[in-house]
Image: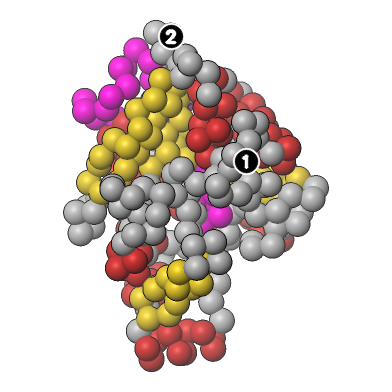
Amino acid sequence: MTNSVKLFDNITLTSSHHSKKILTDIRYIPDHRKKPVILFIHGFKGFKDWGHFNLIADTAAEECFIFVKPNLSHNGTTPENPQDFADLEAFSENNFSIELDDTGTVINYLFSQDCVVPPSEMDLNKLFLMGHSRGGGLVLLKAKEDRRIKGVATWSAVDDFNRWTDNLLKGWKENEIAYVYNSRTKQNMPVKYQIVEDLKSNHERLHISNAVKVLQIPFLIVHGSQDETVGVQSASYLHKLNPQSELLIIDGANHVLGGAHPYYQSILPDHTQTALKQTLNFFKHI
């Protein structure tokens, strides 16, 4: 990070769900010129300070963007422990509608008089969304429902939130809860069946494919050819649904584009550098 990057870390917003907090970081270089804004949304088991996300934010700031990245309210972290899954009860109660509403809360904050960034620094006519994995699906939905969004980029994005097998759903419904093992933290992370019910009851709002078909703003799809979590065919499918989109397949890249948590390097992984360079260039030309 250069010394000129201004940090507003851990701004506390309040979710409209269960009054949980949305810790939000904003990074930019003050120069009294209006800069485009990128709002970045993390994915499942992700958080704003994961791996190389801070380095991504600093790089974007150095390229004359304002970079915003929140911890979604029910991602399992807490204001006291923003990098640890210390609130598994909240994690278990998370769902796609909550995450979509949280994204809207952050957007509304940027447009409010409470925002810490002076109007002289921020061009909200160039507000862009960027999301990784599940966050990629979320930003596509939000871009469809919010006309304030002028461009969207996805990294390793899902093309459908319903990625569960019939066998899993059967046992999950009977038990009302399932567990996802986190190999990094060694935690069994609970997910209540209500997330499935949320997807069913809000099908129209949460249907990624339908949103992509009608998306009329610039749309960039970035995916690794060796993504072990969300297959590269998801990127091809999204591009097929919206032929006006731009598609970048990074040869050899995995789901996190070479990143890891913790990340100790001072430069971004090669695959992330490729993705970020293309993404920032894409946004600059909108």
Q: What is the magenta range?
A: 111-136
Asked if labels 1 and 2 touch by Cβ distance under 8 angstroms, the answer is: no
Q: Point out the residue furthest to the left here.
A: 19
Q: Secondary structure at mark 2?
A: loop
Q: Which mark is residue 220?
A: 1
Which of the pair 100/257 is nearer the observer?
Answer: 257
Residue for badge 2: 31
Q: Secondary structure at mark 1?
A: strand
Q: Residue at x 41, y 13 (%)?
A: 30
* Rendering coords of residue 183 (x, y %): 55, 66
Please determine whether, in this image, residue 30 is positioned above or below residue 82. Answer: above
Which of the pair 211/172 is nearer the observer?
Answer: 172
Q: Residue at x 20, y 59 (%)?
A: 18
* Rendering coords of residue 96 (x, y %): 39, 61
Q: How many discs mark residues in the rendered view?
A: 2
* Rendering coords of residue 34 (x, y %): 42, 14
Please determine whether, in this image, residue 88 is positioned above or below residue 255. Answer: below
Q: Residue at x 30, y 17 (%)?
A: 118
Q: Residues within 10 Å of mark 1 (few under 14, many from 20)?
A: many
Q: Mark 2 or mark 1, which has the lower sequence index?
A: 2
